[in-house]
Amino acid sequence: MKFSKVPEATIRRLSTYARYLEVLEEKGEAVVSSAQLASDCGVNAAQVRKDLAYFGEFGIRGVGYYIKDLYDDIKTILGLNREWRMAIIGIGNLGASLLLYKDFLEQHYKIVAAFDINPSVVVGRVSEKTGKPVEILHPDQLKEVAKDRKIDIAIITTPPSEAQKVADQIAESNIKGILNFTPTLIKVSKGTVVKNVYFTTVLDNVAYLLQSKRR
Amino acid sequence: MKFSKVPEATIRRLSTYARYLEVLEEKGEAVVSSAQLASDCGVNAAQVRKDLAYFGEFGIRGVGYYIKDLYDDIKTILGLNREWRMAIIGIGNLGASLLLYKDFLEQHYKIVAAFDINPSVVVGRVSEKTGKPVEILHPDQLKEVAKDRKIDIAIITTPPSEAQKVADQIAESNIKGILNFTPTLIKVSKGTVVKNVYFTTVLDNVAYLLQSKRR
């Protein structure tokens, strides 16, 4: 398999295909046609073939894809054949709800630490939601905890004004992956992967498309 | 201005520029160079010029951009010179935390209704978080409420298994914009704008990039 310069949109669609295949596998199905897979994932069959072609040859002409095989292959491509260990930094409303976010738990992501500058204030609120005591640590402990608990990815859910400071602490802790939920454009060194999940940017996109249709 | 076929990535960057310009304007600054704007937004100057060129000519050679003018122009382009009225459907942990999400309130988005199939169960929990009573309605009321309260955009934060049913109710209510936080690939009619914000897809992207670096 070659991994150079695969478009981000392809990786995003591979995630979608993987989740779709997982559902089919749970239903006990064995084979899916490329037309069916494409249609159910909201793309066309040529797109599916193009996305997969970055990584090799999949599927059998006239048959389609063996669900288990393709699912396993995509998991290997995406790096989902292992567990990713995560920390959440900033336990406000959003951080607390991510602590409880079931889909993380069901997938290959495990939250192994939670941090807030005011641990004593939030611990009760979070415990009440989870139904069990949750340990909230101070971000100053990040470096030590990151090493002990082998943290791969940090999720930033602090106020925007704190995001860069936290990103610097993440860098010092040698964590190479960041999911940033704040609008702050954080600066990181070259080896670090940052993806931004800022809801308002997506809403702006919806607003733009709605109003441009009206013109 | 021409609005045909503008790449989604351009619209996303325009959001980022707008938020950056807003901060500069609040600081009382008048002018920003294209190099500064580009660098602070994490892109290069050619990209900024290309993004803006879809919509006309902006900026003054040798000076840069007048902050207030460019901010106003981008707001007009994105449709942010008006209020967008939203409903949240599905008030679990994520839905409840979006009800409190400050950035929506500070921007041009207003949540005007909240729905859950079990209103009586969630109302207390949400009220406790907001500090005031919150009215939670049953999704069967969506059509009527959408008309009364002029809802433009619906946010889906239901369990994945309910997302398509809710999308159908949204269609019947004549709401044309959807922000879908579930992994379900909902089907809608042609005139409806759907954007998906499924965190795990973004995490898959981080995982892919981290592991492909290690190869």
Image (cartoon, coloured by chain):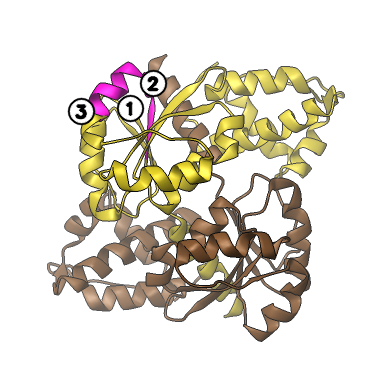
Chain colours: A yellow, B brown
Three-letter code, disc 2? Lys
The quadrant holding residue A77 is: top right
The label on residue B213 is 2
Three-letter code, disc 3? Glu
Q: Residue A165: where, in percent of width, then height? A: 20, 43
The residue to which callout 3 is attached is A172
Could you say whether the residue bearing mark 2 is in a helix, strand or loop?
Answer: helix
Q: Which residue is more in the foreground, B105 or B19?
A: B105
The quadrant holding residue A106 is: top right
Q: For the N terminus of chain A, give its image quadrant.
A: top right
Numbered disc 2: what chain? B
Three-letter code, disc 1? Lys
Numbered disc 3: what chain? A
Q: Is residue B212 above or below residue B67?
A: above
Whether residue A103 is in magenta: the answer is no
Give a yes or no on whether discs 3 and 2 share a subunit: no
Residue at 70% x, 45% y: name it. Answer: A43
Determine whether, in the image, residue A213 is placed left or right of residue A179. Answer: right
The quadrant holding residue B32 is: bottom left
Residue at 36% x, 46% y: name it. Answer: A122
Q: Which residue is more in the foreground, A66 or B92?
A: B92
The reply to whether residue B185 is visible in this rendering is: yes
Numbered disc 1: what chain? A
The residue to which callout 1 is attached is A176
Task: State if disc 2 and disc 1 touch (CB < 8 Å).
Answer: yes
Over which residues does the magenta segment extend?
A142-155
* Front tag of 1 and 2: 1
Residue at 47% x, 28% y: name it. Answer: B207
Question: How far apart are the alpha carbons under marks 1 and 2?
Answer: 10 Å
Q: Residue B19: where, in percent of width, then height? A: 31, 64
* Local crowd size for mark 1, using a 10 Å CA cut-off: few (<14), some (14–19), many (≥20): many
Q: Is residue B31 above or below residue B9?
A: below
